[in-house]
Image (cartoon, coloured by chain):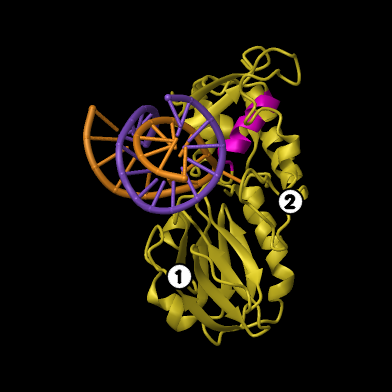
Chain colours: A yellow, B purple, C orange
Amino acid sequence: MPELPEVETTRLGLVPHLEGRQIKSVRLRRADLRWPIPREIKTLLPGQPILGLRRRAKYLLLDVPSGSALIHLGMSGCLRLVDQAQPIGRHDHVDLVLDSGQSIRFTDPRRFGCLLWQPLGQTHDLLRDLGPEPLTAECSGEYLFARSRQRTASVKTFLMDQGIVVGVGNIYAVETLFRAGIAPGRAAGRVSKARYSRLAEAIKTVLAEAIRSGGTTLRDFLHLDGMPGYFKQELLVYGREGQPCLACGRTLSGTRLGNRATVWCGHCQR
DNA sequence: CTCTTAACCTGGACGC
DNA sequence: TGCGTCCAGGTTAAGA
């Protein structure tokens, strides 16, 4: 489900409810997510005040004095704020019960997500080799150009590599490449600096706009209040294979790159 | 190193 | 209605 805008939307929705709260208890129903949920989650979190909820790449970090709970939503995960009375669903794996009476509920049907522990002062291995945040100046055309030299893999695969730049998944890779006029199958090392500048620009505008719209809801991504994200209405190419290009009217092509559905316009993107 | 592929897991959509 | 197949917002491990 979630790329950076959906994770950030989740964070923004949760933050106001966490101010001054503490974690009363942890209800663990199922620990076998992508990696087993470590015992620290169960033993260290209860009784701790919540200091904040940060995001790095597609990870959320729930800070308490002794460290951070590290959360990734995988393909199908979501966090919701629920009341005690909320019935527990088949895929509601963990509740972090707050002293407000509400709980942060982690739901993830496919269990590609994870909930791990990062002790204070340490950086988890999963965060170690991540590239820059896309909405910072570090993610520039110059930077992408420099990192892409000599690389023969497709520019789309390159863009989705979290070691290059974080937060861009399949939907936003397809969208940003369309807006930058770059064919997704082109070798990353054969894209000019000028076009990487356009791409960097597109990454920033598309992600920022998606966050502003509350993310993209394809099937199951919902906000804390159960409302969908509205960026789907602004997708120009994703999911539109065989339909007319909104820029030139020609039929959009579809293929698979790195095993992921890819859509583009053979006329507008080179 | 870089690149490609398979694997993890469940559920929904579709065709027969 | 039921069954098989394919597909889905991500990431890592293994192999070439």
Looking at this view, name the residue that lies furthest to the bottom: A47
Residue A126 seen in the figure: yes
Instruction: Tell me the quadrant of the picture where the C terminus of chain A can be found.
Output: top right
Left or right: B11 as drawn, with respect to A181: left
Q: Return the residue nearer the eye: A222 or A196.
A: A222
Chain letter of the residue beneath label 1 in the structure image:
A
> Label 1 is placed on what type of residue?
Trp
Question: Which residue occupies 66% across, 23% down?
Answer: A194
Q: Quadrant of residue A21?
A: bottom right
Question: Which residue occupies 54% across, 65% down?
Answer: A106
Labelled disc at residue A117: 1
Labelled disc at residue A214: 2
Q: Where is residue A89 in the image (x, y as percent from the top left)?
A: 53, 66
> Eyeballing the image, is A31 above or below A101?
above
Left or right: B6 as drawn, with respect to A14: left
Tell me the element at label 1.
Answer: strand
Q: Report the predominant secondary structure element of the magenta stretch.
A: helix
Tell me the element at label 2.
Answer: loop
Q: Are labels 1 and 2 assigned to the same chain?
A: yes
Residue A171 in magenta stretch: yes
Stretch of the chain drawn in magenta: A168-180
Crowd band around label 1 with a 10 angstrom C-alpha radius: few (<14), some (14–19), many (20+): many
Q: Where is residue A24 in the image (x, y as percent from the top left)?
A: 57, 85
Nearest to viewer (mark 1 / mark 2): 2
> Label 2 is placed on what type of residue?
Gly
Residue A258 seen in the figure: no
Residue A258 in magenta stretch: no
